[in-house]
Image (spheres, helix red, strand yellow):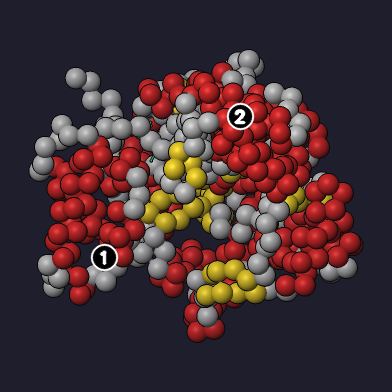
Amino acid sequence: MNDWNEGYFTGSTYTYGYYRELSPAYQRFILLANGFSVSAESDESIHCELGFGQGVSINIHAASNPGYFIGTDFNPAHSSHANDLLKSFSSEEPRIRFFDDSFEQMIDRDLPQFDSISLHGIWTWISTENQKRVVEFARKFLKPGGIFYNSYNVFPGWAPKSPLRELLILHDKFSESNFSTKKRVEDAIQFIQNFVATDPVFLKTAPGFKPMLDMISKQSPDYIAHEFLNRDWICMYFTEVLEMLSDAKLDFACTTELIELYDNLNFNQAALSFLNKIENPIMREQVKDYFLNRQFRKDLFVRGARKISQVESMSRLAKIRFVLTTSDEVKPDFQTVLGNIKIAPEVQDAVIQYLKTDNYRPKSIEEIAQATKSKNPLQTLIILTHRGVIAPCQSDESIKKVKKRCDKLNAYICSRAEFNTNIVFLASPVTGGGFHVNKSEMLVLNSIRHGKKNSKDIARDIWQSFVRTGERISKEGKRLETMEENLPLLEDMAKTVIDKKLSIFHALQII
Ligand SMILES: C[S@@+](CC[C@H](N)C(=O)[O-])C[C@H]1O[C@@H](n2cnc3c(N)ncnc32)[C@H](O)[C@@H]1O
């Protein structure tokens, strides 16, 4: 049998996650907020994602961002799923191409120079040889000034927990491998739980072991298999990754965690004065991982990173518009590693109230500053973006260009919700990214697309779909069988979605 999977776990297909850090629009915003020069969004931009999994993120981004998209995942089941999603909105070949090539094969393709190359959840789980291929790919195909996004497990955060991964993989290696993924994972976890129950001396020196075991036991077997059962699992220090990437002339720019723009929100006074004495920025970044006990990094690198002046970045940021992405009450406090933090709650409140006005239309920092009489609402806006309460927007020109294809992709994803809800994100032309939705919301959006306007008609439309699929509402653990029982509850569901979410859906133009 041909060993195309190079030791990568292919016993089951990967989950259907979405990651906003892979969005070219969001990457540009993060870089700008961190004071780096970024090129404007353009029809000519070409973006690449390596190892796109089921292709949810790359499809959402290819639909909602201008430019060309190329990606690969060597698992043909993943690539064919990604291409199915693509067919729903793109008849514009070759604007978008998804391959089932390995990284090695991609290097030999005749490809253009990319504005960005991104990989999420890949680096730690591939061999050193493949890591080198990724670097070679960036060296060969990333433009000067191009963006490189990489996420990976790191020491020191993983140090106490890597023995857990070792036991999982060993148990899997020495037991019957022809069992289903679910059984292999459950057996391995049970084995380690039995081990922990004996209170071994080892646990005293590795206090992170049991909480980590408890946490992973709650994850889906597919996720655990992909995370832990690969032949390769190479956890590194930040500086080691940087060292390898320097072969592609990549400079570290920043993490994608916007909250890290504000050191005082992440480090106490003692840590801050220690960090401030470290002059070398790379050494400083590495020591931060020790203070944060960081396990996972999401980093942006640039092939030749260029800082711009504060005046220039402020003037470019001032033009960026933001849109509210929730109608729920937004608490003034939020969690950082330092605990619960509250910053300028009155500014936050004024910003949120203003973003709700005029049917939630996106508003620029300039407008927000004027309306809220706040001299500098930027910090509030960045923190709200970090918390996922608001999102930066693309230009009107880009929104117009991508609207139709987002509509088509969203219609397809919502129509799938009748049968399965493995994808729970829709594409927003406004943000150039994905927006989380639940099944009720997708069913209601589907009916609205069918031309249904009020909750009664929507409920009847959803009931028709229930008749086709055999689905029913359950109340207090009891499945309700009849139309008379289901309709009032479906109507309540539709009302809730209309009252709570519809303005947000309209503002994000996902309907
Ligand atoms: C953990 S999944 C992450 C998927 C996706 N990036 C996400 O975050 O949802 C890693 C993916 O990389 C793909 N992959 C691993 N090694 C590869 C290789 N050498 N060439 C191409 N794809 C690879 C796998 O098939 C898998 O879909």
379 relative to 228, above or below: below
Ligand 1 image position (quadrant): top left
Coordinates of residue 69 in the picture (x, y in percent):
58, 28
Report the number of numbered marks.
Answer: 2
- Residue 143 at x, y = what percent? 58, 36
Structural crowding at the residue carrying mark 1, measured as other residues with C-alpha within 10 Å and reported as few (<14), some (14–19) or many (≥20): some
- In the rendered structure, which disc, 1 or 2, sits on the residue that comes first in sequence? 1
Element at badge 2?
helix
Q: Percent x, y for residue 172?
A: 16, 43
Q: Along the line of sight, which residue is nearer the eye, 218 or 53?
A: 218
Q: What residue would you read off at disc 2?
A: 462
Task: Give amino acid for label 1.
Answer: Lys
Residue at x 56% of width, y 25% of height: 465
Image location of residue 509, percent across then percent down: 74, 36
Of marks 1 and 2, the one in the foreground: 2
Cα distance, mark 1 to mark 2? 45 Å
Quadrant location of the N terminus in the rendered image: top left
> Of helix, strand and loop, which one carries label 1?
helix
Residue nearest the viewer, comparing 96 with 479: 479
Nearer to us in this view, 331 or 9: 331
Q: Residue at x 71, y 33 (%)?
A: 456
Q: Residue at x 22, y 20 (%)?
A: 2
Callout 2 environment at 10 Å: few (<14), some (14 to 19), or many (20+)?
A: many
Q: What residue is shown with label 1?
A: 210
Residue 64 visible in the snapshot: no
**Closer-to-camera residue (364/47):** 364
Q: Is mark 2 within 8 Å of ligand 1?
A: no
